[in-house]
Amino acid sequence: GISLYSMNKTDLNRRHFLQLAAAGFLGVTSNDLFSVPGDASTLPLRTNPAKQMIYLFMAGGMSHLDTFDLKPGHENQGSTSPINTKVDGMRFSRHLPGLARHADKLCVVNSLTSTAGDHEKGNYFMHTSYEQRATIRHPGIGAWNHKINGKINPTLPASVFIGRESRFHASGGFFDPEFEPLAISEPSKGLQHTRTKIRDDRFLRRRNLANDLYSEFLERYQSKPVRAYGDMYDDAVRLMESPDLAAFNINREDKKTRDRYGEEPFGQGCLLARRLIEHNVRSVEVSFGGWDTHQGNFTSLPLLCQTMDRAVAALLDDLQRIGKLDDTVVVLTTEFGRTPIVNKNLGRDHYPNAFTSVLAGGGFKGGYLHGKTSEGAEEVIEGSMTIPDFNATIAYALGIPVDHVLYSPTVRPFTVAHKGKPQTALFA
C-alpha cells in the first residue's frame, strides 16, 4: 500500500492529478494503480495474520462497571458483584460465568475512550474510525477485510451482517456495491428467497434471456453500477445452486447445540456466525441491542449479560473445537460505556470517556488485561486507547495495512482506521 507520510509534496500533487484524471475518465478510485516500488508500510504486516473476523456489537452502550471493569467497594459500583475467573487477577461480573470460564482466551481492553457520546455518532465512529458526515459513508472493517484480502470461499458473500441495530454502519461505505455485507435480520430463518417456484429448465431459459438482454445493455451503458448489478445477479444464482447455501441453515444443528447458544436472536446469530466462519466467510457481524440502560440498569443488565454470556461462551467453545479460533478475530464491543455514577432512575447514562471492549482469537493475548481506569471507573489512568487505535489493532490482526490508502469517488484519501496506531502489546 501507499503511505501518505512517505510522499513529498510534489509526488502527492502528481498522484492527486492522476487520481482526478482516472476518476473522471476511467472510474478508478483506488490508489493501487499508482503504487510505487519501494513504498513501505510504517509497520510491517504480521507474518501469519488472522483470516476471518466475528464482530459482536452490543448496541446501546454496554456498561463497563457491570461487565468487565468492576470496582467492588466503590459507591459507583451499585449492586453488581464480581466473580473470579479462570485467570488470577481477572474478575468479571457475576452475570458472566461463561466468559469467566474463557478468561484465558480473552484480551480485555479496559481503557477505551471515545469522542462521540450519542448512539448514532458513537456507533458510526466505532465501526469506521471516522466522524459521521452527511457527504460520505465510510467502509467498516469487514468491507476493508474483503477489499484488501478478497474472498476465501468464492461462492459465499465475503461479509455478512446479522441483526438490525447497526446495519447502516456495518456497510461497504464508498466501496463498490460488491463490498456491501449481506444482511440477515432473522438468523433462525437463514437466507430467504433462495428457491425458485418454476422448473429448472424454465429458470435456465429465463436466465439466458436475461443475460442476453444484459449484455446488450452493458455494451451501451458502460458503468460500475450497471456491472455491479449484473455481478450481484450472477453471485446470487451461483449461491442458489451451491451446496454452501446450507451454511445459512442453523436448523441443521442439533437441539443441544442450539440450546447452548440460547434461543434469543443474538444467540442464534452467533451460531449462524460460527457456521459461516466454518464455510470460510471473511467477516460476520452479529448485533445485539438493548444496552441503553438509562433506567433500571441493575434489573436489565442481568438478562442482557445472560444472553450475551451464553452465546459468546458457546461461540468460543465451538471455534476452539473446530480449530478456527487462532485464525479468527473475535471482537466484543459497543459504542461507549455508561456513567459510573448511578442516576436517579437507578440507571446509567451515556459515557464515552472510559469503557471496555474484549478481543479473542486471532493472535491476541489470552488472560490479558490492558489499561486501567480510576478507582470509580470515571477516567482512564493507564494504557489509554482511542477508537482508531482499537480498530487499527483489529486491522493489524487481519493483515490489513493500516497506512494503505484508498480513494473515495471524490478522490479523498482514506485508510482503514484513520490515524490509528496498532497496539502490538495486545498480541501474544
Image (cartoon, rainbow, N blue to C red):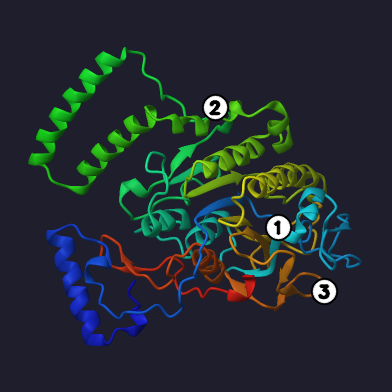
**Residue 245 place in picture, x, y as percent:** 45, 31
Closer-to-camera residue (425/30): 425
**Residue 255 place in picture, x, y as percent:** 70, 26
Closer-to-camera residue (152/230): 152
Of marks 3 and 1, the one in the foreground: 3
The Cα–Cα distance between marks 3 and 2, rounded to whole angstroms, is 46 Å
- Toward the right, the furthest residue is 73
The reply to whether discs 3 and 2 touch (Cβ–Cβ < 8 Å) is no
Mark 1 is on which residue type? Asp
The residue indicated by pointer 1 is 349
Query: Which label sits on residue 152?
Result: none
Q: Quadrant of residue 40?
A: bottom left
Instruction: Note whether 254 is above or below 301 in the view shown.
Output: above
Residue in view at x 64 percent, y 69 percent: 112
Residue in view at x 66 percent, y 44 percent: 318
The residue indicated by pointer 2 is 189
The Cα–Cα distance between marks 3 and 1, rounded to whole angstroms, is 19 Å
Q: Quadrant of residue 266?
A: top right
Judging from the image, what secondary structure is the residue with disc 3 in?
loop
Judging from the image, what secondary structure is the residue with disc 2 in?
helix
Instruction: Note whether 82 is above or below 219 in the view shown.
Output: below
Judging from the image, what secondary structure is the residue with disc 1 in?
loop
- 187 horizontally vs 1: left or right: right
